[in-house]
Amino acid sequence: AQTVTQSQPEMSVQEAETVTLSCTYDTSENNYYLFWYKQPPSRQMILVIRQEAYKQQNATENRFSVNFQKAAKSFSLKISDSQLGDTAMYFCAFMKHHYAGGTSYGKLTFGQGTILTVHP
Amino acid sequence: NAGVTQTPKFRILKIGQSMTLQCTQDMNHNYMYWYRQDPGMGLKLIYYSVGAGITDKGEVPNGYNVSRSTTEDFPLRLELAAPSQTSVYFCASRTTAGYEQYFGPGTRLTVT
């Protein structure tokens, strides 16, 4: 079974500064996907960024980028030029494709979350 | 497209009551999931479905049942509600070949 650990329950950052959220995971799989989801006070789950394990290049989406260290099983999220709207709970998540009889399941395993507060 | 919709948004149940949480998606996704999120925690998978008529258990299925008679609908049934089922419930869906799960807005359930 896979596990995902986020060791920072809470983080805070000043507006316009950079912050990094940590995530480690444990798996024996070689092919999998990692995600960062954002959950603002509205409760909506929003996909921020995705990384495929077979890709060496770190994923980037505008102000969001990841540092993916496969050997260390580490997947951190860097938010540059933080904005007030970035205030939210951030979840790291793991997904491998389960194949049974040719059917893929793609279940997500989530970390405990990190509450990020951006201060003006 | 409305995406993934869930009803109700909020519900209070008494211990021992039953209810069904509704989930509908209009994206023709084969895969659908039910998660629960306890306060301050990440989401845990309750049940999932890979298509109409096919469902299977996730990490925390006890106390719940599901059915999938159509591609669009994936209701979650709570039988004999218990305080331990107080949580926020999310439904999600995705395409067969895709990676992203699209989440509904959630249902906040309190059992007292």
Image (cartoon, rainbow, N blue to C red):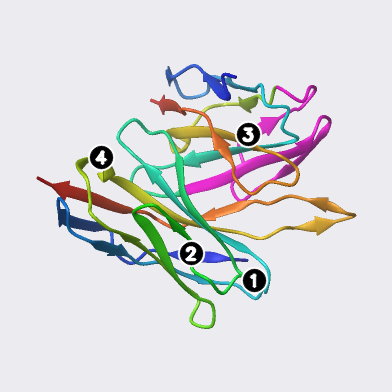
Say which chain tag 4 marks: A
Magenta extent: B43-72
Residue B109 on image: x %, y %: 43, 26
Nearest to viewer (mark 1 / mark 2): 1
| Cα distance in 3D space between marks 3 and 2 | 25 Å
User: What residue sits right under mark 1 in the picture?
Assistant: A54
Q: Quadrant of residue B27?
A: top right
The answer to whether the residues at label 3 and label 1 have Cβ atoms under 8 Å apart is no
The answer to whether the residues at label 3 and label 2 have Cβ atoms under 8 Å apart is no
Q: Say what amino acid the circle numbered 2 marks.
A: Val
Residue B93 is left or right of residue A13, and the answer is right
| Cα distance in 3D space between marks 4 and 2 | 25 Å
Nearest to viewer (mark 3 / mark 2): 2
Q: Say what amino acid the circle numbered 1 marks.
A: Tyr
| Cα distance in 3D space between marks 1 and 2 | 19 Å
Q: Are marks 1 and 4 on the same chain?
A: yes
Return the mark for residue B64. Answer: 3
Viewer-side residue, B65 vs A33: A33
Residue A10 on image: x %, y %: 23, 57
Q: Is residue B1 above or below residue B94?
A: above
The answer to whether the residues at label 4 and label 2 have Cβ atoms under 8 Å apart is no
In terms of secondary structure, where does tag 1 sit? Answer: loop
Return the mark for residue A85. Answer: 4
Graded by Cα atoms within 10 Å as few (under 14), some (14 to 19) or many (20 or more), the crowding at tag 2 reads many
Residue B23 on image: x %, y %: 61, 23
Return the mark for residue A4. Answer: 2
| Cα distance in 3D space between marks 3 and 1 | 36 Å
